[in-house]
């Protein structure tokens, strides 16, 4: 694996008490193989289970780990914003905290970051509810209509950034699922170079997905119009 000088890694967690240990321990194993200096941020999005308690325990055991939490639960976008804001190094990667990705595939992103500003994953085969496949395809159409871009897998929870690229798309305002659309729309506006890499996807072992419920979808629609309006003003 190619080593980078430094890397900030973060995971958003919401009620992932059964997944957090395995997800973080896998990252601890991989991080020193791909970076000379590294940190792992565990972002707790107002969990109501033991996720934060476990994160605090992991933080005590490993000097490279930091637990960050906000209350109450605010949404996926808010968790990503916390991760970006608290990442200290020049390269930043986030990976969803539900155990559905193999963090060792971060080397695919590292191989492409020299020639790009942002590298985003796309799932070779999705292992989630068919309704979410429908939502993903609708999101592609929705984002093309509103923002004029097309990517293979807009909401894939495995993305890699240069800190300089993040500086060009800040501030991010979405609190919910449309955070990924906002990131890509602002990156397009800033003429940043975005590469795509194929990643593996695995069935969720524990916990429930929330991305397909009506409240999340309604919030995403509202946030789309806010993002569209903010980009038009610039």
Image (cartoon, rainbow, N blue to C red):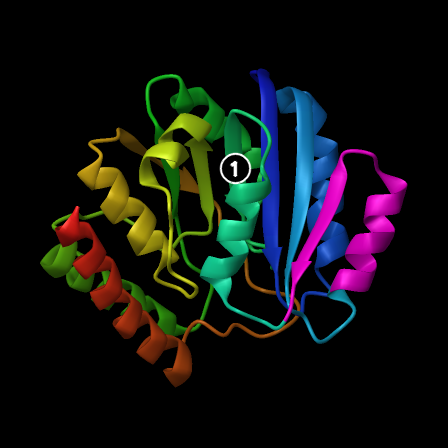
Q: Is residue 145 above or below residue 27?
A: below
Quadrant in the picture for residue 77: bottom left
Measuring from the top left, give residue 48's x and y in whole percent. Answer: 70, 76
Q: Who is closer to the viewer here, 90 or 51? A: 90
Q: Which residue is mark 1?
A: 93
Measuring from the top left, give residue 221's x and y in whole percent. Answer: 26, 73
| Residue drawn where x is 50% and y is 67% of the image | 75
Q: Is residue 45 above or below residue 28?
A: below
Q: Is residue 208 above or below residue 152?
A: below
Q: What kind of element bears circle 1?
A: strand
Number of labels in the image equals 1
| 193 sits to left or right of 71 | left
| Residue drawn where x is 44% and y is 71% of the image | 211
Magenta span has 158? no
Quadrant in the picture for residue 224: bottom left
- Visible residue check, residue 57: yes
Measuring from the top left, give residue 2's x and y in whole percent. Answer: 56, 16
Quadrant in the picture for residue 223: bottom left
Q: Who is closer to the viewer here, 158 or 221? A: 221
Give the crowd class for mark 1: few <14, some 14-19, many >=20 residues within 10 Å: many
Measuring from the top left, give residue 87's x and y in whole percent. Answer: 58, 37
Quadrant of image for the N terminus? top right
| 60 sits to left or right of 214 | right
Q: Who is closer to the viewer here, 174 or 106? A: 174
- Visible residue check, residue 213: no
Q: Which residues are magenta?
A: 52-71
| Residue drawn where x is 68% and y is 39% of the image | 40
| Residue drawn where x is 59% and y is 41% of the image | 86
| 30 sits to left or right of 147 | right
């Amino acid at each position: 694996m190619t080593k980078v000088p430094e890397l900030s890694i973060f995971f958003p967690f919401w009620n992932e008490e059964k997944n957090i240990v395995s997800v973080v321990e896998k990252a601890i194993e991989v991080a020193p193989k791909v970076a000379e200096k590294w940190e792992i941020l565990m972002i707790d999005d107002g969990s109501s289970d033991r996720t934060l308690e476990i994160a605090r325990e992991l933080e005590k055991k490993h000097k490279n780990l930091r637990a960050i939490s906000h209350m109450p639960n605010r949404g996926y976008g808010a968790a990503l914003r916390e991760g970006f804001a608290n990442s200290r190094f020049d390269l930043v990667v986030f990976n969803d905290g539900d155990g559905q990705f193999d963090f060792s595939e971060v080397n695919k992103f590292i191989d492409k970051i020299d020639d790009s500003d942002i590298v985003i994953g796309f799932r070779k085969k999705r292992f989630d509810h068919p309704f979410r496949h429908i939502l993903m395809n609708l999101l592609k159409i929705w984002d093309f209509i509103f923002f004029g871009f097309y990517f293979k897998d807009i909401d894939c929870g495995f993305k890699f950034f240069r800190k300089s690229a993040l500086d060009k798309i800040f501030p991010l305002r979405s609190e919910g699922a449309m955070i990924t659309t906002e990131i890509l729309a602002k990156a397009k506006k800033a003429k940043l170079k975005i590469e795509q890499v194929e990643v593996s996807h695995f069935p969720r072992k524990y916990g429930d997905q929330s991305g397909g419920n009506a409240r999340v979808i309604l919030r995403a629609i509202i946030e789309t119009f806010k993002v569209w309006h903010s980009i038009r003003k610039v």
